[in-house]
Amino acid sequence: MALSRARLSQPHGESTRLLPQVSRLVELPYSSCSDDDADGVSLPGDTAEQDPGLWCPVPPKPSTFSRCVRYLAFLWNLLFLLLGLLLLAVGVWGLLAKAALPRGEHGAPLGSDPMLLFVLGGLGASVVSLAGCLGALRASPCLLRFFLGALLAFAGLEVLGGLLVLLARWRLRDGLQDLLLLCLLRYQEDPDLQFLVDEVQRSFQCCGLRSYHDWESNPYFNCSAPGVQACGVPASCCQDPLESGSVPNAQCGFGVLALGAAAAGAVVHVGGCGAALGAWLRGQAGAIAAGAAALVLVEAVGALMALRVLGDVVAFRAWG
C-alpha cells in the first residue's frame, strides 16, 4: 500500500517541478527587433502572447508618385540653378570687362552699376535653387524649409511690387522720365547707359526724352561746350546713320541743334522717346501680365513639389 502511494506521488512531483519551467517559457517576451526574427523563425502563439509595445514600427515605403515628385523637384531646381549661375556669370563678366577699361572709362561706380543686378539676381537664384536641389536629393527638412521660405519671400516681394505699380503708376511714370533724363546727362560716362540709350533711340526711331532738343542738357552736346560734339546729337538719332554706305557715320548728328526744325527733321528723328516708350509699355501690358503670372506659376509648382517632399520626409522620420 505504501509502495503504491509512492508510485502515485512520483509523477505528481515531476509535473510540479515542470510547471515553473513551462510558465517561464510562456512568459518570455518576444520582439520583432530581436535577432531571432532576422533568422525568419516564428513560433506558434507568438503573435497572441507578444506585447504590442515591443514591436518596432516598420516605416512605410514611399510610393512611386512620391519618388517621382522628389526627382522632379530635384531636376526642376537644377534647371533654375543653371539659369542662376548663367545670370551670375554674365554679371561677373560685365564687371570684370569694365574693370579692364582704362581709368576714366569705367562708367558708373559699383553701387549703381547695372551689372550688379545680374550678380545679385543670379546669386540669389543660385542659392535658393541649390537649397531646393540638396533638400530634395538628401531629404533634408532644414533645406526644404529654407527653400519654401525663400519662395514665399520672393512671392511677397512680387505681389508688393505689383501693388505699387498699380497704385503709384503716375509717380512711377514721372520717375521713369527722370531716369531717362539722367541717362541723357550721363551718356558719355557710362558705357551701359550709352548702349541702352542708343538701342532705344534706334528701335523707336526717336531722339531725346521729349524732343531732340533735350540733348542740349548734356554737357558734351551743349552748344556752349568745347569740342566737335557741340550742338550735336548721338548718331543713334540719325534717320540714315549709314548714309547709303556700309560703315556707320558717327558724325551724322553733329551740328543738328544749330539747325532749324525743318532742316533737323531731314537728318535726325525729332520726336522724343518718352511718348514712344510709354506707348510701347502700354501695348505690352498683356505680355507683362502673362510673364508675371507665369513666374508666379513656376514658383507655385516648385513650392508644391517641395511641400510634398517635405511631408514625406517628416512622415518617414516620425516612424523612426
Image (cartoon, rainbow, N blue to C red):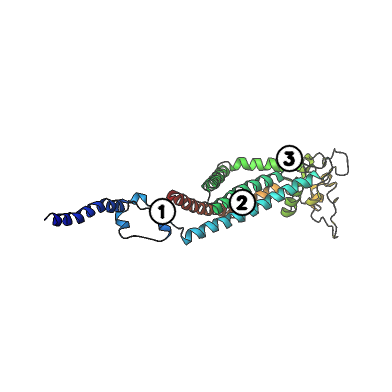
> Can you say whether 199 is above or below 111 in the image?
below
Q: Quadrant of residue 42?
A: bottom left
The secondary structure type at the circle numbered 2 is helix
- The image quarter containing residue 222 is top right
Mark 1 secondary-structure assignment: loop
Q: Specify the amino acid type for callout 3.
A: Leu
Q: Position of residue 53 (x, y in %)?
A: 35, 49
Q: Which residue corresponds to the image point at 88% horizontal and 44% vertical from the top-left?
A: 228
Mark 2 is on which residue type? Answer: Arg
Task: Residue 276 in the image: state x and y as whole percent.
Answer: 68, 50
Question: Which residue is found at the position 45% from the left and 52% from the top?
Answer: 316
Closer to the camera: disc 3 or disc 1? 1
For the residues labelled 3 and 1, the Cα–Cα distance comes to 66 Å
Residue identifier under label 1: 34
Q: List the residue tagged with mark 3.
A: 110
Amino acid type assigned to the residue bearing label 1 in the image: Ser
